[in-house]
Amino acid sequence: MRKEQRIKKNKEFQESFQKGQSFANRQFVVYALAKKDQEYFRIGLSVSKKVGNAVTRNQIKRYIKQAILELSDQISKGNDYVIIARKPVAEMGFFDVKKSLTHVLKVGKVLSKKY
C-alpha cells in the first residue's frame, strides 16, 4: 500500500468511527466513510492486544494488507476504510482472512460486482 493510501492519525480514525457506516462479521468490523474529493481509497488497520502477541498481530496486518492489495481493483474509490480484526482472526490463515474480508466487504456493498 502506498503511503497516501494509509490512515495513520487518530483524528482520522475517530472521524471514521463517528461519521462512517459500519458493517461486520465474526472476524472483522469495517467502518466506511465517504470522501468526495478523494480519487483513491485509504485503509486504516486496528488489531487489539487481545488478539495475540506482537508477532500474531503483525502477521494479521500483513494478511489484511495483502488481501486488500489483491482486491484493490474491486474496492470502491473515494472512501476511507478502517478495518478492525476480532479474536477469531488469530487462528486463521491467509486464504481464510481474505475470504472473510471479502465477505464483510460484500455485506457493506464496497466491492464491485466483478468478483
Image: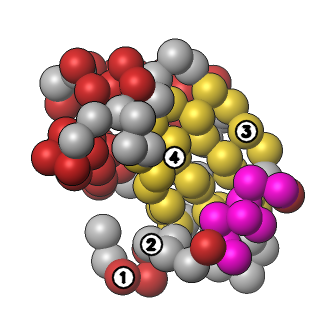
Task: Tell me, for residue 6, which label it has, or none.
Answer: 2
The Cα atoms of the two marked residues, 3 and 1, are separated by: 24 Å
**Marking on residue 83:** 4
Mark pair 3, 2: CA separation: 18 Å
How far separated are the C-alphas under marks 4 and 2?
12 Å
Q: Helix or strand or loop: what does disc 3 sit on?
A: strand
Which residue appears at 27% of the width and 27% of the height? Answer: 90
Dot placed on the residue nearer the N-terminal end, 4 or 1: 1
Q: Is 40 left, or right, of 60 in this rendering?
A: right
Camera-side mark, 4 or 1: 4
Residue 61 x, y percent position in the rendering: 29, 49
Quadrant position of residue 89? top left
SS label for mark 4: strand
Q: Which residues are magenta?
A: 11-18
Residue under circle 3? Answer: 22
Q: CA distance from mark 1 to mark 2?
A: 6 Å
The tag on residue 66 is none
